[in-house]
Protein backbone atom coordinates (compact mmCIF):
# COMPACT_ATOMS: atom_id res chain seq x y z
CA UNK A 1 0.00 0.00 0.00
CA UNK A 2 1.27 3.43 -0.94
CA UNK A 3 2.21 5.62 2.05
CA UNK A 4 2.57 9.39 1.88
CA UNK A 5 4.57 11.28 4.49
CA UNK A 6 2.66 14.46 5.25
CA UNK A 7 3.94 17.34 7.41
CA UNK A 8 1.06 19.05 9.19
CA UNK A 9 1.52 22.71 10.12
CA UNK A 10 -1.78 23.82 11.70
CA UNK A 11 -0.32 27.26 12.55
CA UNK A 12 -2.25 30.10 14.14
CA UNK A 13 -5.80 31.21 14.84
CA UNK A 14 -8.38 29.07 13.12
CA UNK A 15 -5.64 27.09 11.33
CA UNK A 16 -5.71 24.16 13.76
CA UNK A 17 -9.52 23.92 13.61
CA UNK A 18 -9.74 23.79 9.84
CA UNK A 19 -6.79 21.41 9.53
CA UNK A 20 -8.47 19.03 11.99
CA UNK A 21 -11.53 18.98 9.71
CA UNK A 22 -9.40 18.52 6.62
CA UNK A 23 -7.70 15.53 8.27
CA UNK A 24 -11.07 13.82 8.66
CA UNK A 25 -11.61 13.90 4.90
CA UNK A 26 -8.00 12.90 4.20
CA UNK A 27 -8.36 9.88 6.47
CA UNK A 28 -11.68 8.95 4.88
CA UNK A 29 -10.14 9.23 1.41
CA UNK A 30 -7.13 7.15 2.44
CA UNK A 31 -9.21 4.23 3.69
CA UNK A 32 -11.61 4.33 0.74
CA UNK A 33 -8.99 4.62 -1.98
CA UNK A 34 -6.33 2.43 -0.43
CA UNK A 35 -3.38 4.54 0.61
CA UNK A 36 -1.83 5.52 3.92
CA UNK A 37 -0.93 8.88 5.41
CA UNK A 38 2.00 9.04 7.75
CA UNK A 39 1.61 12.45 9.40
CA UNK A 40 3.95 14.50 11.60
CA UNK A 41 2.84 17.71 13.31
CA UNK A 42 4.97 20.86 13.42
CA UNK A 43 4.11 23.69 15.81
CA UNK A 44 5.39 26.58 13.66
CA UNK A 45 3.42 29.77 14.20
CA UNK A 46 2.83 32.76 16.41
CA UNK A 47 2.31 30.91 19.67
CA UNK A 48 5.63 29.10 19.34
CA UNK A 49 7.39 32.34 18.41
CA UNK A 50 5.96 34.19 21.42
CA UNK A 51 7.05 31.36 23.71
CA UNK A 52 10.52 30.65 22.33
CA UNK A 53 11.50 33.79 20.41
CA UNK A 54 12.30 31.60 17.43
CA UNK A 55 10.28 31.93 14.23
CA UNK A 56 11.48 28.71 12.58
CA UNK A 57 13.95 26.25 14.07
CA UNK A 58 17.15 25.78 12.04
CA UNK A 59 16.22 22.22 11.22
CA UNK A 60 12.74 23.09 9.89
CA UNK A 61 13.62 23.31 6.22
CA UNK A 62 15.74 20.18 6.13
CA UNK A 63 13.11 18.27 8.14
CA UNK A 64 10.37 19.32 5.75
CA UNK A 65 12.39 18.20 2.74
CA UNK A 66 11.83 14.65 3.93
CA UNK A 67 8.06 14.79 3.36
CA UNK A 68 5.89 14.15 0.31
CA UNK A 69 3.76 17.21 1.05
CA UNK A 70 2.99 19.87 3.63
CA UNK A 71 -0.52 20.65 4.81
CA UNK A 72 -0.68 24.17 6.25
CA UNK A 73 -3.47 25.88 8.20
CA UNK A 74 -2.75 29.59 8.65
CA UNK A 75 0.09 31.84 9.71
CA UNK A 76 -0.53 35.19 11.47
CA UNK A 77 -0.95 36.14 15.14
CA UNK A 78 -2.56 39.32 16.55
CA UNK A 79 0.22 39.74 19.15
CA UNK A 80 3.06 39.54 16.62
CA UNK A 81 4.01 42.53 14.47
CA UNK A 82 2.85 42.02 10.84
CA UNK A 83 5.63 40.69 8.63
CA UNK A 84 7.56 38.61 11.13
CA UNK A 85 5.60 35.39 10.83
CA UNK A 86 4.55 35.94 7.22
CA UNK A 87 8.12 36.45 6.05
CA UNK A 88 9.74 34.19 8.63
CA UNK A 89 7.50 31.19 8.11
CA UNK A 90 5.18 31.28 5.10
CA UNK A 91 7.42 33.09 2.63
CA UNK A 92 10.55 31.36 3.91
CA UNK A 93 9.01 27.95 3.31
CA UNK A 94 7.85 28.98 -0.16
CA UNK A 95 11.31 30.32 -1.04
CA UNK A 96 13.59 27.76 0.56
CA UNK A 97 11.56 24.82 -0.67
CA UNK A 98 11.53 26.58 -4.06
CA UNK A 99 7.76 26.29 -4.38
CA UNK A 100 7.82 28.45 -7.45
CA UNK A 101 4.17 28.03 -8.38
CA UNK A 102 1.21 29.24 -6.40
CA UNK A 103 -1.75 27.48 -7.97
CA UNK A 104 -5.11 29.03 -7.14
CA UNK A 105 -8.27 27.62 -8.69
CA UNK A 106 -11.24 29.99 -8.83
CA UNK A 107 -14.35 27.90 -9.26
CA UNK A 108 -17.88 28.81 -8.27
CA UNK A 109 -19.62 25.70 -6.97
CA UNK A 110 -23.39 25.16 -7.26
CA UNK A 111 -25.38 26.64 -4.40
CA UNK A 112 -22.73 29.21 -3.55
CA UNK A 113 -23.90 32.78 -3.41
CA UNK A 114 -21.87 34.83 -5.88
CA UNK A 115 -21.63 38.59 -5.43
CA UNK A 116 -21.71 39.06 -9.21
CA UNK A 117 -25.13 39.66 -10.71
CA UNK A 118 -26.21 37.06 -13.28
CA UNK A 119 -23.10 34.88 -12.90
CA UNK A 120 -23.26 31.21 -12.03
CA UNK A 121 -20.99 28.16 -11.94
CA UNK A 122 -20.99 28.08 -15.76
CA UNK A 123 -19.22 31.47 -15.78
CA UNK A 124 -16.60 31.11 -13.06
CA UNK A 125 -14.08 28.34 -13.50
CA UNK A 126 -10.48 29.40 -14.02
CA UNK A 127 -7.08 28.89 -12.44
CA UNK A 128 -4.45 31.47 -11.58
CA UNK A 129 -0.82 30.36 -11.81
CA UNK A 130 1.03 32.85 -9.61
CA UNK A 131 4.84 32.98 -9.62
CA UNK A 132 5.75 32.34 -5.99
CA UNK A 133 9.46 33.02 -5.39
CA UNK A 134 10.40 36.28 -7.13
CA UNK A 135 9.04 39.72 -8.01
CA UNK A 136 8.41 42.22 -5.24
CA UNK A 137 8.35 39.35 -2.74
CA UNK A 138 12.06 38.59 -3.19
CA UNK A 139 12.82 41.16 -0.48
CA UNK A 140 15.29 43.20 -2.54
CA UNK A 141 15.67 46.87 -1.67
CA UNK A 142 16.49 48.87 1.38
CA UNK A 143 16.03 52.06 3.30
CA UNK A 144 18.20 55.12 3.74
CA UNK A 145 17.92 57.85 6.38
CA UNK A 146 15.00 56.11 8.03
CA UNK A 147 12.75 58.34 10.11
CA UNK A 148 14.17 61.56 8.66
CA UNK A 149 12.56 63.89 6.10
CA UNK A 150 15.10 62.54 3.58
CA UNK A 151 14.04 58.93 4.02
CA UNK A 152 14.29 56.71 0.95
CA UNK A 153 12.55 53.33 0.68
CA UNK A 154 13.29 51.06 -2.27
CA UNK A 155 11.45 47.81 -2.96
CA UNK A 156 12.66 46.11 -6.10
CA UNK A 157 10.92 43.54 -8.26
CA UNK A 158 13.25 40.70 -9.19
CA UNK A 159 12.39 38.83 -12.38
CA UNK A 160 14.84 36.24 -13.68
CA UNK A 161 14.64 34.55 -17.06
CA UNK A 162 14.85 31.19 -15.30
CA UNK A 163 12.13 32.05 -12.78
CA UNK A 164 9.80 33.53 -15.36
CA UNK A 165 10.35 30.72 -17.86
CA UNK A 166 9.72 27.88 -15.42
CA UNK A 167 6.52 29.56 -14.23
CA UNK A 168 5.21 30.18 -17.74
CA UNK A 169 6.12 26.63 -18.83
CA UNK A 170 4.22 25.25 -15.85
CA UNK A 171 1.22 27.37 -16.84
CA UNK A 172 1.25 26.15 -20.46
CA UNK A 173 1.57 22.55 -19.32
CA UNK A 174 -1.11 22.97 -16.67
CA UNK A 175 -3.42 24.46 -19.30
CA UNK A 176 -2.86 21.41 -21.52
CA UNK A 177 -3.45 18.97 -18.63
CA UNK A 178 -6.57 20.80 -17.54
CA UNK A 179 -7.78 20.41 -21.10
CA UNK A 180 -10.76 22.77 -20.86
CA UNK A 181 -10.66 25.80 -23.12
CA UNK A 182 -6.88 25.54 -23.56
CA UNK A 183 -6.44 29.25 -23.30
CA UNK A 184 -3.61 30.87 -21.35
CA UNK A 185 -3.76 34.55 -20.44
CA UNK A 186 -0.65 36.44 -19.40
CA UNK A 187 -1.61 39.05 -16.82
CA UNK A 188 0.92 41.89 -16.52
CA UNK A 189 1.57 45.57 -16.95
CA UNK A 190 3.55 45.88 -20.17
CA UNK A 191 2.49 49.50 -20.65
CA UNK A 192 4.25 50.81 -17.56
CA UNK A 193 6.56 48.19 -15.99
CA UNK A 194 8.48 47.90 -19.22
CA UNK A 195 11.56 46.06 -17.92
CA UNK A 196 9.92 43.23 -16.03
CA UNK A 197 6.96 42.75 -18.32
CA UNK A 198 9.06 42.84 -21.45
CA UNK A 199 10.86 39.79 -20.06
CA UNK A 200 7.58 38.10 -19.17
CA UNK A 201 5.94 38.89 -22.51
CA UNK A 202 8.93 37.82 -24.60
CA UNK A 203 9.23 34.57 -22.68
CA UNK A 204 5.48 33.93 -22.97
CA UNK A 205 5.57 34.50 -26.74
CA UNK A 206 8.80 32.58 -27.30
CA UNK A 207 7.39 29.50 -25.59
CA UNK A 208 4.00 29.65 -27.31
CA UNK A 209 5.05 27.61 -30.42
CA UNK A 210 6.05 24.71 -28.14
CA UNK A 211 2.45 24.59 -26.91
CA UNK A 212 0.70 25.29 -30.19
CA UNK A 213 -2.58 23.74 -29.01
CA UNK A 214 -2.89 26.45 -26.35
CA UNK A 215 -4.43 29.76 -27.38
CA UNK A 216 -2.67 32.77 -25.88
CA UNK A 217 -3.96 36.05 -24.62
CA UNK A 218 -2.74 39.08 -22.70
CA UNK A 219 -4.48 41.33 -20.16
CA UNK A 220 -3.15 44.19 -18.09
CA UNK A 221 -3.58 43.58 -14.37
CA UNK A 222 -5.84 46.57 -13.82
CA UNK A 223 -8.07 45.51 -16.71
CA UNK A 224 -8.21 41.92 -15.48
CA UNK A 225 -9.79 43.04 -12.19
CA UNK A 226 -12.50 44.61 -14.29
CA UNK A 227 -12.98 41.46 -16.39
CA UNK A 228 -13.12 39.24 -13.29
CA UNK A 229 -16.22 41.18 -12.31
CA UNK A 230 -17.73 41.76 -15.75
CA UNK A 231 -16.73 38.69 -17.79
CA UNK A 232 -15.11 35.99 -15.61
CA UNK A 233 -16.19 33.41 -18.22
CA UNK A 234 -13.42 34.68 -20.50
CA UNK A 235 -10.72 32.98 -18.45
CA UNK A 236 -9.33 29.47 -18.40
CA UNK A 237 -5.76 29.68 -17.05
CA UNK A 238 -4.01 32.92 -16.10
CA UNK A 239 -0.28 33.27 -15.45
CA UNK A 240 1.13 36.25 -13.58
CA UNK A 241 3.84 37.45 -11.20
CA UNK A 242 3.89 37.17 -7.43
CA UNK A 243 2.41 40.55 -6.47
CA UNK A 244 -0.27 40.69 -9.15
CA UNK A 245 -1.14 37.07 -8.40
CA UNK A 246 -1.55 37.87 -4.72
CA UNK A 247 -3.96 40.69 -5.47
CA UNK A 248 -6.08 39.16 -8.22
CA UNK A 249 -6.57 35.88 -6.33
CA UNK A 250 -8.21 37.69 -3.41
CA UNK A 251 -10.67 39.08 -5.92
CA UNK A 252 -10.93 35.60 -7.40
CA UNK A 253 -11.70 34.18 -3.96
CA UNK A 254 -14.55 36.65 -3.52
CA UNK A 255 -16.23 35.77 -6.81
CA UNK A 256 -16.05 32.05 -5.97
CA UNK A 257 -17.80 32.62 -2.66
CA UNK A 258 -15.17 34.03 -0.31
CA UNK A 259 -12.26 32.96 1.84
CA UNK A 260 -14.28 30.09 3.29
CA UNK A 261 -13.87 28.12 0.07
CA UNK A 262 -10.63 29.35 -1.57
CA UNK A 263 -7.68 26.96 -1.55
CA UNK A 264 -4.25 26.98 -3.09
CA UNK A 265 -1.08 25.01 -3.57
CA UNK A 266 2.51 26.20 -3.26
CA UNK A 267 4.10 23.85 -5.72
CA UNK A 268 7.63 22.76 -6.44
CA UNK A 269 7.07 20.26 -9.27
CA UNK A 270 10.45 18.71 -8.51
CA UNK A 271 10.30 18.98 -4.70
CA UNK A 272 8.08 19.34 -1.65
CA UNK A 273 4.82 21.23 -2.13
CA UNK A 274 2.56 22.87 0.44
CA UNK A 275 -1.22 23.19 0.39
CA UNK A 276 -3.26 25.77 2.30
CA UNK A 277 -6.59 27.52 2.57
CA UNK A 278 -5.81 31.02 1.31
CA UNK A 279 -7.73 32.94 3.98
CA UNK A 280 -5.78 34.04 7.04
CA UNK A 281 -5.79 32.95 10.66
CA UNK A 282 -9.06 34.82 11.44
CA UNK A 283 -8.28 35.50 15.14
CA UNK A 284 -11.76 36.80 15.90
CA UNK A 285 -13.32 33.46 14.95
CA UNK A 286 -10.75 31.29 16.69
CA UNK A 287 -12.05 28.51 18.90
CA UNK A 288 -15.70 29.31 18.25
CA UNK A 289 -16.52 26.41 15.92
CA UNK A 290 -17.79 28.90 13.32
CA UNK A 291 -15.01 29.02 10.72
CA UNK A 292 -15.67 27.37 7.37
CA UNK A 293 -13.34 24.39 6.89
CA UNK A 294 -14.17 23.89 3.20
CA UNK A 295 -11.13 25.85 2.01
CA UNK A 296 -8.84 23.64 4.08
CA UNK A 297 -10.70 20.54 2.90
CA UNK A 298 -10.34 21.69 -0.71
CA UNK A 299 -6.63 22.31 -0.08
CA UNK A 300 -6.41 18.69 1.06
CA UNK A 301 -8.05 17.74 -2.24
CA UNK A 302 -5.45 19.72 -4.18
CA UNK A 303 -2.75 17.93 -2.20
CA UNK A 304 -4.16 14.51 -3.10
CA UNK A 305 -4.36 15.52 -6.75
CA UNK A 306 -0.74 16.62 -6.61
CA UNK A 307 0.25 13.31 -5.04
CA UNK A 308 -1.44 11.53 -7.95
CA UNK A 309 -4.47 10.30 -5.98
CA UNK A 310 -6.89 11.64 -8.56
CA UNK A 311 -9.90 9.58 -7.58
CA UNK A 312 -9.53 10.61 -3.95
CA UNK A 313 -9.17 14.25 -4.97
CA UNK A 314 -12.30 13.99 -7.11
CA UNK A 315 -14.21 12.43 -4.20
CA UNK A 316 -13.28 15.38 -2.00
CA UNK A 317 -14.38 17.86 -4.63
CA UNK A 318 -17.71 16.05 -5.11
CA UNK A 319 -18.28 16.05 -1.36
CA UNK A 320 -17.58 19.80 -1.20
CA UNK A 321 -20.01 20.38 -4.08
CA UNK A 322 -22.65 18.30 -2.32
CA UNK A 323 -22.19 20.46 0.77
CA UNK A 324 -22.48 23.77 -1.08
CA UNK A 325 -25.41 22.68 -3.20
CA UNK A 326 -27.46 20.82 -0.58
CA UNK A 327 -26.40 21.35 2.99
CA UNK A 328 -24.88 24.73 3.74
CA UNK A 329 -26.86 27.92 4.27
CA UNK A 330 -23.87 30.10 3.46
CA UNK A 331 -20.08 30.01 3.34
CA UNK A 332 -19.21 32.84 5.72
CA UNK A 333 -18.02 32.14 9.26
CA UNK A 334 -21.02 31.60 11.53
CA UNK A 335 -23.43 31.61 8.57
CA UNK A 336 -23.16 28.00 7.48
CA UNK A 337 -26.17 26.73 9.40
CA UNK A 338 -23.89 24.26 11.17
CA UNK A 339 -20.63 24.33 13.08
CA UNK A 340 -17.08 23.83 11.81
CA UNK A 341 -16.80 20.28 13.11
CA UNK A 342 -20.25 19.26 11.76
CA UNK A 343 -19.20 20.42 8.32
CA UNK A 344 -15.96 18.44 8.63
CA UNK A 345 -17.81 15.31 9.76
CA UNK A 346 -20.37 15.56 7.00
CA UNK A 347 -17.77 16.06 4.25
CA UNK A 348 -15.71 13.15 5.58
CA UNK A 349 -18.85 10.99 5.61
CA UNK A 350 -19.48 11.83 1.94
CA UNK A 351 -15.84 11.17 1.05
CA UNK A 352 -16.05 7.78 2.78
CA UNK A 353 -18.81 6.93 0.28
C1 LIG B 1 -1.25 34.87 0.40
C2 LIG B 1 -1.02 35.78 1.55
C3 LIG B 1 0.48 35.93 1.76
C4 LIG B 1 1.05 36.54 0.48
C5 LIG B 1 0.87 36.76 2.98
C6 LIG B 1 0.24 36.24 4.25
C7 LIG B 1 2.37 36.85 3.14
O1 LIG B 1 -1.64 37.00 1.34
O2 LIG B 1 -0.89 33.67 0.49
O3 LIG B 1 -1.78 35.31 -0.62
O4 LIG B 1 1.10 37.76 0.34
O5 LIG B 1 1.48 35.76 -0.37
MN1 LIG C 1 -2.76 37.11 -0.48
Image (cartoon, rainbow, N blue to C red):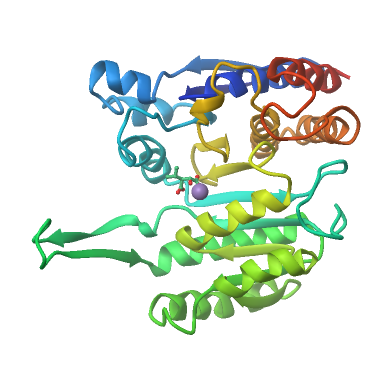
Q: Is residue 97 left or right of residue 274?
A: left
Q: Is residue 146 left or right of residue 269?
A: left
How far from the left and from the top, in percent, is residue 155? 28, 63
Residue 46 appears in view? yes
At 41% across and 38% down in the image, what residue appears?
90
At 76% across and 72% down in the image, what residue appears?
213
Name the image quarter holding the N terminus.
Answer: top right
Q: Is residue 340 left or right of residue 43?
A: right
How far from the left and from the top, in percent, is residue 208? 63, 76
At 40% across and 38% down in the image, what residue appears?
93
Image: 316 above or below 31:
below
In which quarter of the view is residue 118 placed? bottom right
How far from the left and from the top, in percent, is residue 185? 65, 71
Residue 1 appears in view? no
User: Looking at this view, is 71 or 167 the one in front?
Assistant: 71
How far from the left and from the top, in percent, is residue 71? 55, 28
At 33% across and 42% down in the image, what residue appears?
83
Image: 68 above or below 270:
above
Amino acid sequence: MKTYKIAIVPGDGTGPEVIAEGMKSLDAAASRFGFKLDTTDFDFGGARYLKTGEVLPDTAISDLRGFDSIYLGAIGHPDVKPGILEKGILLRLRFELDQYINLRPVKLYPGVECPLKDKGPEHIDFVVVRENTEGLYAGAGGVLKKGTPDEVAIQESINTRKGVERCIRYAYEYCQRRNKRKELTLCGKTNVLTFAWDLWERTFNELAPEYSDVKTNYAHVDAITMWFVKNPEWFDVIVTDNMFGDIITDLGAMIQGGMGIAAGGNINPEGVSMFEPIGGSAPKYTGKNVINPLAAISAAGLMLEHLGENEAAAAIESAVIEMTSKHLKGLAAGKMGMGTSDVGDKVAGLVAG
